[in-house]
Image (cartoon, helix red, strand yellow):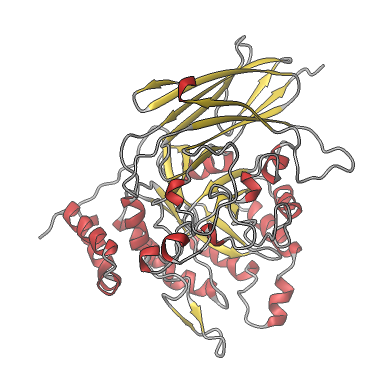
């Protein structure tokens, strides 16, 4: 009999060779045999843990429009949940969220079929912390990930949320219209906010339907603000880098992210990538609004799809202990950075008061100065020497330090622009100290009013991320982004 590692490597090889019939029939058997030799591998200390909160299994089903709610498994999504877990582990992920979506009666499919398979997957792959979740067909918007806390009643919690609030759960046009209202999403968020342990909601691919820069007909920034106002501990962010980044590798002239009208910029949604745009405007209001990156895996590009495997290209890193509760809380608090192509694997942005009167803070945190003055920013990033999953060894070409003011918008000013946001310094290789795989740099700024501080980096020579052409190889255009550190002043002048 093959040992544990041999079984897994054999299955990975089969996946990569696209032997789908054999895999789908035997993945649970293979993984169960592997799991018999595994032990629980929880870790007591915090570290950067890579994950993905937006992926699909075979339970993102297809529907017979003439005979609703009849459905067929394995149409919109192809793979069993244990295969997603296996491939996530193979590509370096520590945590995942099962986020299938569907249409009429999908809450029943999720509860009765998908959830038991998730339980099997958890037993088979204990190395991966697996959350139960949903890609919500969001009322009056596009899609959003719901991450359900790991509790004894997680399955009934999600069944209740999907059955009550998913806009496609019912199968008549009249019922769908009744659900497709913004107040229904606000009701859903308030319901989640009342739970003993609150779920999380991230808007998915928010500007995918934007026809041009700054034009948002489907997911309006106003709506995102309303979500955050209604449940600030639940609606906490959006995808900065959408999935479906492998389109150009499988389909001629396909755009990255499946963004046809206004393309991604460096692989990132314009709401994030446009300096001083929507994300910066929300941070400029002091909102704790975080960004993520993920695969949106339905079908791998090697199987004629447009997505990478979870973790193959995009990763969302959280600073947490390796357990459900710690990961969920770190996501809620914005202790997050995102990267594509494994450009980096660790990132520390420490903001400190040089005078020592205030405690320092890291990504997602806040420094409270006693009075206006200087802050010192230390950036430390791990630039791994090994190959990424394309066989490349990308190197950081530049790191940008970005600062924006936190103020209330002036009357008549666009809510979706923060004109104060600027790159205050660009670091190149000559500007940082290398310590093995790590690069270190410091910078000091004077702070006279509240600000937020974030960083981004790239392997390109683009000073700002440009619009991605439809045939761009995503492996050649890599970026990472941190979430912000806020600086407040206790005694303002």
Q: For this rendering, which residue is in front, 90 or 149?
A: 90
Q: Residue furthest top?
A: 355
Q: Where is residue 305 in the image (x, y as percent from the top left)?
A: 43, 67
Q: Residue at 26% of width from left, 58% of height from top?
A: 12
Residue 404 location (% of width, % of height): 70, 31
Does residue 445 appear in this view? yes
Location of residue 212 by image quarter:
bottom right
Asked if residue 153 shows in the view, the reply is no
Is 311 placed left or right of 142 in the picture? Answer: left
Q: Residue at x 55, y 32 (%)?
A: 363
Q: In this view, does 111 lie above or below 452?
A: below
Q: Which residue lies furthest to the bottom in this view?
A: 66
Determine whether 364 is above or below 125 in the image: above
Residue 202 versus residue 381 in the image, above or below: below
Q: Quadrant of the N terminus?
A: bottom left
Q: Where is residue 197 in the image (x, y as percent from the top left)?
A: 57, 49
Q: Nearer the viewer, residue 490 or 52?
A: 52
- The reply, left or right, for residue 355 in relation to residue 337 is right
Give the quarter of the figure containing the C terminus: top right
Horizontal side of 119 relative to 168 (left or right) equals left
Closer to the camera in the image, 286 or 108: 286
Q: How many marks?
A: 0
Q: Where is residue 479 in the image (x, y as percent from the top left)?
A: 50, 41
Residue that extends furthest to the left in the rendered view of this protein: 1
What residue is drawn where x is 58% and y is 38%? Answer: 333
């Amino acid at each position: 009999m093959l040992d544990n590692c041999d079984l897994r490597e054999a299955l990975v090889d089969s996946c990569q060779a696209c032997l789908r019939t054999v895999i789908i029939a035997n993945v649970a058997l293979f993984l169960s045999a592997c799991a018999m030799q595994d032990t629980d591998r929880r870790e007591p200390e915090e570290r950067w843990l890579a994950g993905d909160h937006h992926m699909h299994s075979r339970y993102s089903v297809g529907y017979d429009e003439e005979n609703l709610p009849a459905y067929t498994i394995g149409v919109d999504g192809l793979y069993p949940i244990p295969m997603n877990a296996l491939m996530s582990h193979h590509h370096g992920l520590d945590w995942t969220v099962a986020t299938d979506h569907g249409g009429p009666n999908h809450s029943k499919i999720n509860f009765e079929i998908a959830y038991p398979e998730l339980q099997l997957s958890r037993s088979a792959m204990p190395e991966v912390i697996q959350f139960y979740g949903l890609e919500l067909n969001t009322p009056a918007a596009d899609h959003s990930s719901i991450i359900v806390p790991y509790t004894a009643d997680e399955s009934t919690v999600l069944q209740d949320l999907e059955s009550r609030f998913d806009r496609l759960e019912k199968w008549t046009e009249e019922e769908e219209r009744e659900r497709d209202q913004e107040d229904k999403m606000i009701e859903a968020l308030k319901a989640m906010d009342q739970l003993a342990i609150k779920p999380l909601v991230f808007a998915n691919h928010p500007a995918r339907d934007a026809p041009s820069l700054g034009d948002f007909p489907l997911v309006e920034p106003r709506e995102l603000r309303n979500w955050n106002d209604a449940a600030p501990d639940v609606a906490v962010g959006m995808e900065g880098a959408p999935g479906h980044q492998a389109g150009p590798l499988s389909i001629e002239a396909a755009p990255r992210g499946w963004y046809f009208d206004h393309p991604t910029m460096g692989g990132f949604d314009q709401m994030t990538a446009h300096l001083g745009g929507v994300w910066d405007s929300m941070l400029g209001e002091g909102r704790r609004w975080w960004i993520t990156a993920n695969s949106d895996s339905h079908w791998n590009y090697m199987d004629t799809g447009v997505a990478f495997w979870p973790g193959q290209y995009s990763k969302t890193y959280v600073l947490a202990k390796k357990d459900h509760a710690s990961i969920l809380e770190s996501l809620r608090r914005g202790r997050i950075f995102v990267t594509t192509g494994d450009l980096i694997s660790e990132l520390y942005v420490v903001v400190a008061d040089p005078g020592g009167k205030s405690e320092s803070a890291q990504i997602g945190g806040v420094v409270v100065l006693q009075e206006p003055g200087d802050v010192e920013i230390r950036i430390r990033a791990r630039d791994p020497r090994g190959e990424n999953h394309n066989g490349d060894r990308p190197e950081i070409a530049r790191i940008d330090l970005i600062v924006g003011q936190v103020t209330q918008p002036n009357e008549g000013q666009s809510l979706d622009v923060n004109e104060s946001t600027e790159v205050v310094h660009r670091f190149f290789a000559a500007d940082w100290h290398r310590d093995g795989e790590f690069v270190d740099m410091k910078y000091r700024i004077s702070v006279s009013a509240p600000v937020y501080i974030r960083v981004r980096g790239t392997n390109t020579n683009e000073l700002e991320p440009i619009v991605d052409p439809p045939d761009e190889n995503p492996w050649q255009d890599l970026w990472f982004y941190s979430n912000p550190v806020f600086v407040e002043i206790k005694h303002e002048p």
